[in-house]
Amino acid sequence: MFTLITKRLIQLIPTIFFVSVLIFLLQQLLPGDPALVMAGEEKDPEVIEQIRKRYRLDQPLPIQYLAWIGGVFRGDLGESMRLSEPVSTLVAQKLPVTVQLAVMAMIFTLGIGIPAGIISAVKKDTAWDYVVNVVALWGISTPNFWLGIMLIFLFSVQLGWLPASGYVSPFEDFRASMAATIMPAFVLGNSFAGVIMRHTRAAMLQVMESDYVRTARAKGLDERTVILKHGLRNALTPVITLGALEFGTLLSGAVLTEQIFSIPGFGKLIVDAVFNRDYAVVQGVVLVTATTYIVLNLLADIGYILANPRLRT
């Protein structure tokens, strides 16, 4: 296990380097000149020149990249051209919001998807199986923006139980924070729960037909132990992979959901940065997101080993 983790950590270095180069080069493809955007309506040539020098926009791309990546290694993601604030500060402000939303969404995803997948597999070709599959298909097919608007109309406008938009930190008011984020978390979790359910069902169906499951039943073990200990544990490998990737997707910022519920997370931050040609913010946010994906894949590999002892050899 230690050898596997060491190999994965060594692989992170060239992967992150390649990702950083790709992010920087793709950033240059964005149309428009950030210096002209920041110069305002008058577009004074002297002001434009000062902006170019301040943010190294007048230097060759390799020099710009080396200056940026050197700052990244020092923990400096650059400075926002529009807000004149360090990108690391903006990330530190927005990341906890998105992490809270992503964690709550994953609770809904796993809490709904895994039990539903188990029920569907165990009750194969019964009414329960058909009902669960219909609900999963509904969750996958329902657009997040439509479901979000319907939830706001029902629980905020009609019933008045929950706030329609906004965000409150859990450290300020935990109850108000849960009330503000439970609807967007459910919207995100609902769409992923259907995917998790289908993968759990497929993995469980394959595992339940295995020889060791038949042996466990022949030994007289009760059905619950067979399903949860011998079946589910061995079926978790593809679910762990999918769960890690879905969590990374949530951390990258669910743009539409955050816009509908006015959640000031990563999604809103990167959309504003793209529209304002704020190169440093876009590069910083995308690099943090890409690094998160890579780390989550490493954690998924570790999860494989913990869930399936056969992989330890």
Image (tube, rainbow, N blue to C red):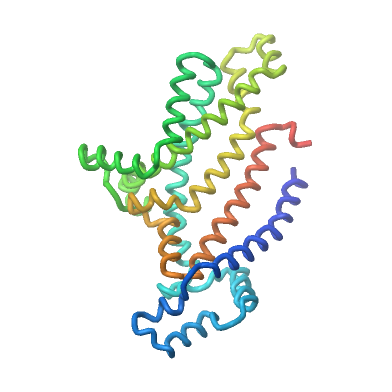
| Viewer-closest of 12 and 2 | 12
| Viewer-closest of 246 and 313 | 246
Which residue is drawn at the image coordinates 39% and 41% (left, top)?
143
Residue 204 in the figure: left or right of residue 88: right
Q: Is residue 262 above or below residue 24?
A: above
Q: Please provide percent x and percent y for residue 71.
A: 59, 73
What is the quadrant of the N terminus in the image?
top right
Residue projecting furthest to the bottom? 46
Which residue is drawn at the image coordinates 45% and 15% (left, top)?
127
Residue projecting furthest to the front? 31
Q: Quadrant of residue 311?
A: top right
Q: Please provide percent x and percent y for residue 72.
A: 59, 69
Q: Quadrant of residue 231?
A: top right
Q: How many marks?
A: 0
Q: Is residue 186 above or below residue 12?
A: above
Question: In this view of the protein, can residue 113 be seen by the observer?
Answer: yes
Which residue is drawn at the image coordinates 43% and 75% (left, top)?
84
Which residue is drawn at the image coordinates 63% and 28% (left, top)?
235
What is the quadrant of the C terminus in the image?
top right
Q: Quadrant of residue 37?
A: bottom left
Q: Please provide percent x and percent y for residue 140.
A: 46, 35
Question: In this view of the protein, can residue 230 be seen by the observer?
Answer: no
Q: Please provide percent x and percent y for residue 92.
A: 47, 62
Residue 252 in the figure: left or right of residue 305: left
Q: Is residue 44 above or below residue 273?
A: below
